[in-house]
Every structure is written in C-alpha cells, then in structure tokens.
Amino acid sequence: MSRIAACLEACQASGRKAVIPYIVAGDPWREVTVPAMHTLVAAGADIIELGVPFSDPMAEGPVIQLGHERALAHHIGMADVLAMVAEFRQQDPSTPVVLMGYANPVEVMGYERFAQAAVAAGVDGVLTVDMPPEEAGEMNSVFAQHQLDSIFLIAPTTTDARTKAICEMATGYIYYVSLKGVTGAGHIDTDEVKSKVNGIKRFTSLPVCVGFGIKDGESAAAIAECADGVVVGSVLVNGMGDCVGMAARNTDGADVLEGKDKAVLAEEVNARVMSIVSEIAAGANR
Amino acid sequence: MQTPFSSDPKKIDYSAMPDERGHFGPYGGRFVSETLIAALDELQAAYLSLKDTPAFQAEFDRDLAHYVGRPSPIYHAERWSREIGGAQIFLKREDLNHTGAHKVNNTIGQALLAKHMGKPRVIAETGAGQHGVASATVAARFGMECQVFMGAEDVKRQSLNVYRMKLLGAEVIPVTSGSRTLKDAMNEALRDWVTNVDNTFYIIGTVAGPAPYPQLVRDFQSVIGREARRQMVTQTDRLPDALVACVGGGSNAIGLFHPFLEDESVAMYGVEAGGFGVETGKHAAPLNDGKPGILHGNRTYLMEDENGQIIDTHSISAGLDYPGVGPEHSWLKDMGRVNYVAVTDDEAMDAFRALTQIEGIMPALETSHALAYAAKLARDMDKDKTILVNLSGRGDKDILTVADIDGITL
C-alpha cells in the first residue's frame, strides 16, 4: 500500500480528517523548506503538498504566485525540490509528500527520468495542475509503473462524465477545488461543496480532500464536515511570505534577504507555520 | 507522431488538423487546470455549432467588408524589387485594415462568438497593445465591457496604445507578476477568465493557448490567405513562388499560409525575431533555438531553461517578444512544410527604412522582420519569380521606438 493510502486509511479508521498543507519549495528561501516541513508535521499535517516553483503558475492567485517568484529568485529547480524531499525523508520516513506543480518542469526531465528521481527521493504522489485527464495518459502510466500516485483536480464545473473519467485515472486522493477561480479566492459555500463531494463519491472510493478558500479554523471545520481532508495553501504561503515582506526583491532589485539574519527569520517562519497549521488542524478535527 | 494521411500515403492532409482534441501531431492540446475545462468546452461547442452556418459566416463577412475594409489589396513593390535585383515582391496589405493590422480579423470573429454566447464582458492580453486596441475597438462596436491585461513593463513602453485603449472605453490592467510582459499578461487573463467565466469571453490574440483557440484564430485569420491566393492568380496569372510572414505567436503567418499548404509549388518562410542574434541567446525565436514544452495550455516549441522555467525573450518588436509559438507552426516545422528562419533587430530596422523610403509604406517592426527575410530571399531568385509578404501591420505605433534608436526625442 502506498504511503498516501496508508495515511488516509489510518485517518478514516480513527475518524480523523486529513490535514494537507501546501508550501512552495524554496519559499522564502532554500534552507527554510525542510525545517518547515517538519514543523508542518509537528503542527498536525498528515500529508504535505510541496509546490514546485514555476515561472508561469497560471492557476494560482497572487499570494502563491509570489511564493513561486520568491523561490525562483533563489533558482530553485526540480533537482533542488527532490533534494529537499530526500533530506526530509532522512528524519521522517512516514509522512506522505505530494509534489504539486506544472507540467513543463516535468516534461523537460522526461516522465521516466522524473518518476525514477521522485521515487528515489521519497515522493509519494504528483499533482500536475495543467495536465487534465485527456492529456495525462502517458504521464499517468509511467507514474503508475513507479507506484507514484497521480492526484487529480475536480472543479465545481466538472461534469459527471469527466468526474468519472478522472476518478478512473486518479490514485491517492481526489483534490476537489471548492471555488471557481484561482487559489486564494473568495468564500466557500459549504452546502455546495457537500453536494459536490457526495457526487464525486458516487464514482470512487478514494478519499476526497477539499482545497481553495480554507483560511482558518472556522472554514477548516466547515469543510471538514463534508470532506475526508482539507488542503490549506494561500494563507500559509502568505504567512511565510509575510515574514520577509512578500516580495522576492526590493524595488531596487536586490534580494530582500540581503543583510537579514536568516536564523532569526527562519524561527519566525517556523512559528508562523506552527500557528497557522495548528489552528487549521484543530478546526478540521474539532 | 500522429500524421493524417489522405488517399495518397505520401500526401499530408493539412486541413485535417487539428484532431478533435486540438492536437497538431504531438503539439497543441489542452494543458490547463480542470477549473478552465468547462469554459473551453463551452467555447468549443459554440464555435463548432456556429462556424459553418451561413448566418454566422455572412455576419463575419459583412463586418470584414464594411468595418475592417476587406479585401485588403495586394501591391507589387516594383521599385523595391528592382533595387534588390531579384524576385518580384508583392505585399498583402493587412496594414490597411481598420486599426492598422491583421489583428482585427480575429477580434471581429471572436466578438461575434461572444455576442452569440451571450457574454457581455470581454478580456484580452496584449504585448505591444495592437491586439488590445483591436479588442477594445470591437468591444466598443459591440457595446461590450472590455478589460485588457498588459505587462507593467509594456504599459510603460507603449503609452500611446494604452491611451488609445482607454479612449475606446477599455480598462487597461497592468500586470506586475513574473517578467511583467506579454506572457504574464496571458497568465493573468486566464486567471481572470477562470474566475469570471459566467459573463466573460477571453479574446486570445494569437494562434496559441489551449484548444480550441489555435484553430479558431487560424480560421478567422485564414481570410488573408484565401484572398491572397485569388488575388495573386488574378494579378500574376499564377500562384506565388514563396510566402513570407513574421512569427511571434504566429497568427498573421498561419492566416496567410494555411490556404496555401496543399500547394506544393509554394515555399513558405516563417520569420522569427532573432533579437541580437540567435547565437547570443537574446532573441524570441523558439522554432530556431527552443524545444518542445508546455506553456499557456498547449504543447509547442518554447524558450526555456534546463529546469523548464520559461525564459525572458528579447526583440526590438514587442509583438514578437513571446517565448512560445502557435502549436500548428511547431507541427509545420517538424513536417518540413514551412521553413522557420530568424532575422535580427538590425536587419529588421534596415528593412523598415528601406520600405518606408523606397515604397512610401511604413511597416510595423514585426512586419519588418518578414520584409528583411524576403529581401534576402529575393536576391537569390530569378526576376520572373514572385514572393508574397504578409504586410501584417503599419508602423505608426513604432515611431517612438525608431526615434529612440536614432537618438531623437520627439
């Protein structure tokens, strides 16, 4: 059984809702990520979604875009992301890690080479935002050969026919996007989410986790009522970015971290991560 | 690679592309988040149900004739041809269209689609501002709300077009993410669309983006090639020996080329922006010096680094300054049907001055790339051969850039 399946089964067996935080690898800088991943777990994360920075993250709202820009200011590439996962795995052999990102950084490596490297680093699943089921066939079969889970998005506008097709390809869990729009947008309608999640469950026995629009303990609690897990991204990336003033560079183009005491900043980032994820985790399992 | 064959196994059926999922061989397709799929399905269904209906065609043709001013003429640049001393160069005068470029052919078509789909709001991305102006123009004409996304860097560089769009009633939204240029404007327009899809139509300006855009934009722009084919036969009694067009995203090129693809005697040249020279890496020529990848919803040749990050491009011409290219061009390159070449900033400037001074026609800097290559090509061809260049836009918008190069402040 994959680490993701084992983790989500254990959650369900104990009546818990999975807590799935998302951070961007290398945001706000390289060395912060692995300690932050351990902090996420200490704060109650069941699965970690690790964002792979991309120059053109077209499905992201402004907050996560800035997270990608901060990471790219430090030239974080796929090899760096995989090295972070491998380092995390040295101390944490059990928490599943899902890479969430865009197709091109995977394409440029080739599916086979990427899959081998990802598994070797200890990655459990991959969510490729701009790879819908129609285009995902080849990638999916390579990932399946390597026992890498393929996580897919389902949106409020996804038809039943597509939902069925996506559920047939998906492994690990289904990520239901609770809002129209980009990451970090608006307010969620929990009744609608509940009916959609139930609709998805007609086609799959996979756990359905819900993301987009979860901001605090309150919204996590509301969503947890109708889902198997909650994903929290923007509020967390915002909190981490806030520690360095959000931007990757000053107005004069210099790195915002220049001249700062990184050890002090790292403590601040970890404290933020702890407080945000603890609140969400408590809300999700109120 | 999927290759559509007709009854003759060696002959490729170019009209069969794209397939029903928007693929041109391995290129094109629909690489977008699930959140956008329903919007693209809605658009595709509307387009396929309308495109061949006589009523929609008549509406489109009427606007092209009476609003855009089609057909655009074909002009024999006799003095310039004589000076070059080779093949005869003919110009398809898309610069004479309303708003001064080929862009309006497509925005008229898409605005008609928006009208039929009941969308009161249109959005567009723009680099130099030409597509933004063409979108703002048709939005004014159809009484639609219009917002144009434009990289913050481009807003600074193209203040004249920004003001034109404002006068036309559009709102220009500066995009401050990423490299703050055309590719980021496209990202932002896609983000707006996914959020406001219920009332919004996204008018993409080139033959890129997710399916069905590359096909839809090609179909609207193909009026250029259909007219040109007829006009060349009328004016010269035969088809041209070569076609030349500049390629950024590639909409004016595909519009000219597509109706000629089955004509084996017609050679085709797509001219990319070579910037400071392809060998310097500072250019916008993915078909010459890029490799296939995924950006803006389709698989195509891209300018990318070893990590798959899209890299900044350089061209003197803002309209060609794009790291990708329409997927059909990628396919035509691989099939060997079209030759993709590059000319530098300096070569384009020389052609800009030559056409302006010898023929009294001031071309856009984008178009000047095509002219520069046509001049090179003509030199090595006999005087009885003909080259047709798509004169895709007029150069008024570039006067400040040219003055700047000349060290003159206007």
Image: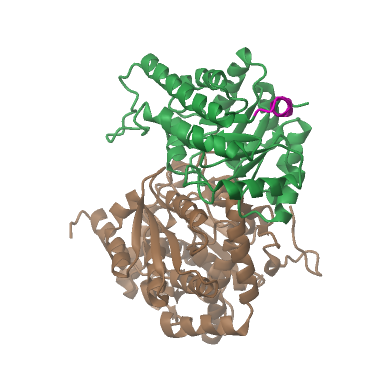
Chain colours: A green, B brown
At which x and y percent is residue B3? 74, 59
Please tell me which residue lies in front, B223 or A8: A8
What number of labels is visible?
Answer: 0
Residue B266 appears anywhere in the view: no
Instruction: Give the image quarter of residue A69.
Output: top left
Q: Quadrant of the C terminus of chain B?
A: bottom left
Q: Position of A226 compared to B182: left or right?
A: right
Please tell me which residue lies in front, B248 or A218: A218
Q: Is residue B150 above or below residue A178?
A: below
Please tell me which residue lies in front, A32 or B308: A32
Which residue is rendered at x = 34% and y = 32% of the image? A249
Task: Tell me which segment is drawn in magenta.
Answer: A5-16
Q: Position of B218 compared to B281: left or right?
A: right
Q: Position of A35 compared to B215: left or right?
A: left
Which secondary structure dominates the residues rendered in magenta? helix
At which x and y percent is residue B295? 55, 48
> Furthest-front residue in view?
A286
Please tell me which residue lies in front, A205 or B405: A205
At which x and y percent is residue B16? 71, 67
Q: Is residue B195 above or below residue B357?
A: above
Residue B363 appears anywhere in the view: yes
> Furthest-left residue in view?
B409
Q: Is residue B279 above or below residue A277?
A: below
Residue A63 shown in magenta: no
